[in-house]
């Protein structure tokens, strides 16, 4: 059928045929119009209807794309919601783990604290030869437990992000002198030479955290060096003071060096070495260095020893009067009047034994009310107070504040297992000293001696 | 008579008013007293073509200067109280919530993409100069001379320049006289022109279009046209008016706007039907349309579904998505209003529109995303929340 051609000539014989012929002609014209339309569709050009049709198709495309975009966005936000849920769950689990660990550590620290105090008091007694040795062993074992526990607490606190650095300027010698003294003895015990080069530089850091890092370097050096010598010293760099610990130990080959640094990134890499080898200790070192933003360094060759370093920014500090001599004589403590407030009777007993061993005159109280009653009749040079007292009682800071008002010149040492930076800050603002549990006897003794020599000079607010 | 309607505390930055005073100066003064405020930044108005237009223009300029105005003549107004006729309705937008710019397309024939691009860039820059809040979004309102026969090309060109900016609008009317329609911008009324108003706001808004017509079985093929004058000469290879009259079951002499409103024709593109409204029967038996026609297009006979129920559903949807709207600017085809008048439902419609806070006008054609469409209710709903 030729749609384009005219229909063949036709002479209708009937009315019906005439109607059909007419309809045929119309259908051919309709068909022609549709063909024309179909064939001109999609043609570019300014035909007004074409512009409308084009706009409709465009709008339809835009609508479809918008729809698919919406679907994609919805899918994304759903995925996001699921991720957020998973994250919240993980965080909650982590949080409860951290809280549990903190609680367990706290509960373990209490009895350990008491045991350390008793052992220390026992060491000061005149004991038969064998007993002295055994007491020494007990003391060292307790110290190990304490170190292990401390590491666990630190890891959990670092992971939970609750540990915030308490940065201040201090002479680096304040830190290194003490460490040098401590490790000189340890090195000597293992037949190693120990050289310490003091520095007069003032640095800006968190003293306690930085101490952990350097102590870890020194512990590793002592542990792994069979013979030769150790060096503790500093190098002045343009952008900070490099505190370094060098040894003549076995060294670490270059390939392994990288592995060690990788281990810095992980927590416990080799459980059997937890706090015994590089695994856990250096993991903490790395985290602390990260947090303080102090770069770490390691230079070593196999068989030629190792040199670990940490670079600390310089600090500025007003000249302080020369500190008291580091190891105070017992005479300064002798006769000092000390009040001890703690709600744990075992701690009270242990503390009393220790302090009395140093010649102090000790009065113990287990409640603030008892101590206040006591304070109305007597005077004291120093108050040792636990921050956490029995539920219902005011905290140690409040008690100390109240006693200081009644007894100007009273020295205060706040003792707490809570490593909260705020607490330390509050204590410092009031001019109090702050000691963390477990209380180390030597540290306590130095603190008390300094306090007494200052003559209670630090005013209480 | 005037009506300042700060609908709710959150919505006072949009104020609406109307006046049915036939004196241009008094009408302008009434609007000004209702809309005036220190923050008033732009006024949009729709007025009956019965007003002496040049006097009205001067009176409005005097009453509102230096605040810019845009607007057009109508085939009926939608006031804050529902449908009106022979009056003027206005909306005042405050600067704090809205940055608004406006431009006129004076030569519709010569409006090509480069001009469109310049126009849109200029409008957006103008809005930015008014320092709208950072997260403001734009929409465009177009008002076209409804008898210019160039809506399709102008809109397609403008749409290309607008890109993703939502747009809608209406063609100006003249109370069904079909002789002179005008748009207002740059301080005066103009014919053969278009006005583009760019509105940017932080408020949520939604541009929408809807109609209540459903397809029937019958199809009509356009077999002869007079393209330039939007005339269909033949349907199904028969004189157009005759064939249409056969379809609706009326004699040709009885064909009028009311019949066209009740028995519309539409083209189907994809899944959607777009009504092509008939304007009138010409003496030669052809049908004149409100929109472009082409040989070979297939027209589908349409029938009405209940209009107000359908519209109420759409308005509910808008409120669900945006919250109670502060304002709906509506371009409502005058054929819809004719249908409502024939059915005696104008009062019910007025109540529905007033409750939904619609103001606007009855058009000779609507515009949506670059499409020139007929017999729809098209507009923008602006939410109350900032």
Image (cartoon, helix red, strand yellow):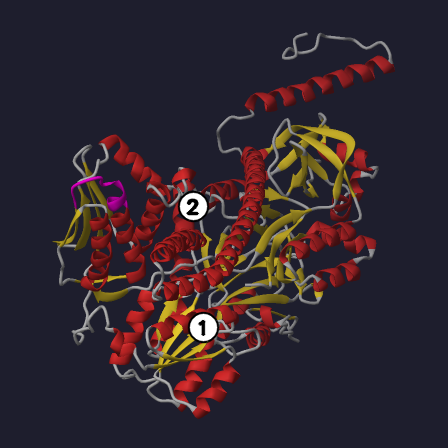
Please tell me which residue lies in front, A84 or A117: A117
B134 falls in the magenta region: no
- Look at the numbered discs 1 and 2 and tell me whether their residues touch, using CB distance below 8 Å: no
Closer to the camera: disc 1 or disc 2?
1
B242 relative to A170, above or below: above
Residue B198 shows in the view:
no
Write down the quadrant of residue A461 in the picture: bottom left
The verdict on a common chain for dots 1 and 2 is no
Lateral position of residue B223 relative to residue A456, left or right? right
Write down the quadrant of residue A168 in the picture: bottom left
Indicate the quadrant containing the C terminus of chain B: top left, top right, bottom left or bottom right.
bottom right
Residue A253 locus on image (x, y percent): 23, 32
Lateral position of residue A350 relative to residue B321, left or right? left
Residue A3 locus on image (x, y percent): 66, 12
| Chain holding disc 1 | A
Please tell me which residue lies in front, B138 or A93: A93
The magenta stretch is A220-229
| Chain holding disc 2 | B
Residue B7 locus on image (x, y percent): 64, 70
Q: Residues within 10 Å of mark 1 (few under 14, many from 20)?
A: many
For the point 62% across and 74% down, which residue is it?
B4
Indicate the quadrant containing the N terminus of chain B: top left, top right, bottom left or bottom right.
bottom right
- State the SS at label 2: helix
Residue B75 locus on image (x, y percent): 66, 56
A223 falls in the magenta region: yes
| Name of the residue lying farthest toward the bottom | A377
Q: Which residue is mark 2?
A: B116
Q: Which residue is mark 1?
A: A386
């Amino acid at each position: 059928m030729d749609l384009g051609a005219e229909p063949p000539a036709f002479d209708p014989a009937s009315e019906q045929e005439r109607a059909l012929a007419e309809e045929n002609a119309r259908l051919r014209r309709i068909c022609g119009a549709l063909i024309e339309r179909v064939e001109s569709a999609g043609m570019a050009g300014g035909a007004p209807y074409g512009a409308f049709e084009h706009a409709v198709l465009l709008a339809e495309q835009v609508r479809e794309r918008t729809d698919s975009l919406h679907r994609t966005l919805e899918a994304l936000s759903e995925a996001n919601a699921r991720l957020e849920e998973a994250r919240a769950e993980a965080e909650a689990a982590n949080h409860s783990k951290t809280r549990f660990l903190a609680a367990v550590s706290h509960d373990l620290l209490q009895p350990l604290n008491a045991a350390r105090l008793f052992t220390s008091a026992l060491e000061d007694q005149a004991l038969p030869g064998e007993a002295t040795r055994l007491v020494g062993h007990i003391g060292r074992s307790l110290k190990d437990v304490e170190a292990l526990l401390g590491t666990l607490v630190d890891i959990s606190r670092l992971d939970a992000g609750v540990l915030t650095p308490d940065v201040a300027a201090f002479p680096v010698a304040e830190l290194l002198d003490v460490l040098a003294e401590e490790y000189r003895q340890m090195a000597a015990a293992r037949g190693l030479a120990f050289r310490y080069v003091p520095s007069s530089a003032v640095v800006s850091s968190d003293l306690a955290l930085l101490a952990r890092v350097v102590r870890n370097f020194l512990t590793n050096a002592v542990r792994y060096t069979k013979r030769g010598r150790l060096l503790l010293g500093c190098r002045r760099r343009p952008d900070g003071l490099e505190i370094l610990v060098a040894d003549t130990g076995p060294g670490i080959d270059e390939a392994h060096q990288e592995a060690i640094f990788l281990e810095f990134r992980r927590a416990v890499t080799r459980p059997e070495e937890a706090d015994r080898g590089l695994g856990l200790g250096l993991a903490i070192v790395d985290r602390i260095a990260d947090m303080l933003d102090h770069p770490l360094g390691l230079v070593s060759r196999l068989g030629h020893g190792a040199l670990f370093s940490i670079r600390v920014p310089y600090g500025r500090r007003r000249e302080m009067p020369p500190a008291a001599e580091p190891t105070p004589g017992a005479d300064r403590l002798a006769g000092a009047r000390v009040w001890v407030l703690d709600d744990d009777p075992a701690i009270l007993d242990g503390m009393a034994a220790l302090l009395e061993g140093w010649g102090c005159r000790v009065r113990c109280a287990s409640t603030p009310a008892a101590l206040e009653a006591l304070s109305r009749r007597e005077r004291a040079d120093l108050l040792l107070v636990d921050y956490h007292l029995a539920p219902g009682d005011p905290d140690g800071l409040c008690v100390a504040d109240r006693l200081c008002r009644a007894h100007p010149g009273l020295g205060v040492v706040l003792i707490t297992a809570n490593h909260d930076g705020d607490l330390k800050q509050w204590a410092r603002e009031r001019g109090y000293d702050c000691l963390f549990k477990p209380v180390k006897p030597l540290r306590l003794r130095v603190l008390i001696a300094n306090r007494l020599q200052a003559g209670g000079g630090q005013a209480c607010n | 008579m005037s009506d300042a309607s700060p609908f709710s505390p959150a919505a006072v930055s949009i104020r609406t008013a109307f006046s049915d005073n036939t004196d241009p100066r008094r009408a302008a003064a009434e609007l000004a007293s209702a809309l005036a405020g220190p923050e008033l930044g732009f006024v949009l108005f729709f007025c009956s073509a019965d007003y002496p237009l040049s006097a009205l223009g001067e009176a409005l300029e005097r009453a509102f200067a230096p605040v810019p105005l845009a607007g057009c003549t109508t085939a009926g107004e939608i006031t804050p109280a529902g449908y009106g006729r022979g009056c003027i309705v206005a909306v005042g937008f405050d600067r704090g919530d809205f940055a608004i710019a406006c431009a006129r397309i004076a030569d519709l024939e010569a409006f090509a993409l480069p001009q469109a691009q310049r126009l849109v860039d200029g409008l957006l820059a103008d809005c930015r100069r008014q320092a709208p809040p950072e997260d403001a979004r734009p929409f465009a309102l177009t008002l076209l001379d409804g008898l210019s026969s160039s809506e399709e090309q102008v809109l397609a060109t403008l749409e290309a320049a607008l890109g993703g900016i939502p747009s809608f609008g209406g063609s100006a009317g003249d109370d069904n006289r079909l002789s002179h329609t005008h748009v207002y911008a740059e301080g005066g009324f103009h014919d053969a022109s278009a006005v583009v108003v760019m509105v940017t706001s932080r408020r949520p808004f939604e541009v929408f279009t809807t109609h209540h017509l459903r397809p029937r079985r019958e199809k009509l093929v356009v077999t002869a046209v007079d393209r330039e004058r939007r005339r269909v000469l033949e349907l199904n290879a028969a004189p157009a008016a005759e064939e249409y009259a056969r379809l609706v079951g009326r004699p040709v002499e009885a064909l009028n706007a009311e019949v066209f409103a009740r028995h519309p024709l539409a083209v189907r593109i994809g899944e959607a039907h777009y009504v092509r409204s008939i304007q009138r029967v010409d003496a030669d038996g052809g049908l004149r349309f409100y929109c472009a026609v082409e040989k070979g297009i297939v027209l589908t006979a349409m029938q009405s579904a209940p209009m107000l129920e359908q519209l109420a559903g759409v308005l509910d949807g808008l409120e669900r998505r945006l919250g109670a709207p502060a304002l709906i600017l509506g371009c409502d085809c005058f054929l819809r209003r004719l249908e409502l008048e024939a059915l005696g439902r104008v009062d019910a419609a007025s109540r529905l529109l007033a409750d939904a806070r619609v103001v606007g006008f009855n058009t000779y054609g609507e515009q949506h995303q670059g499409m020139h469409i007929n017999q729809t209710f098209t507009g923008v709903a602006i939410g109350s929340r900032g």
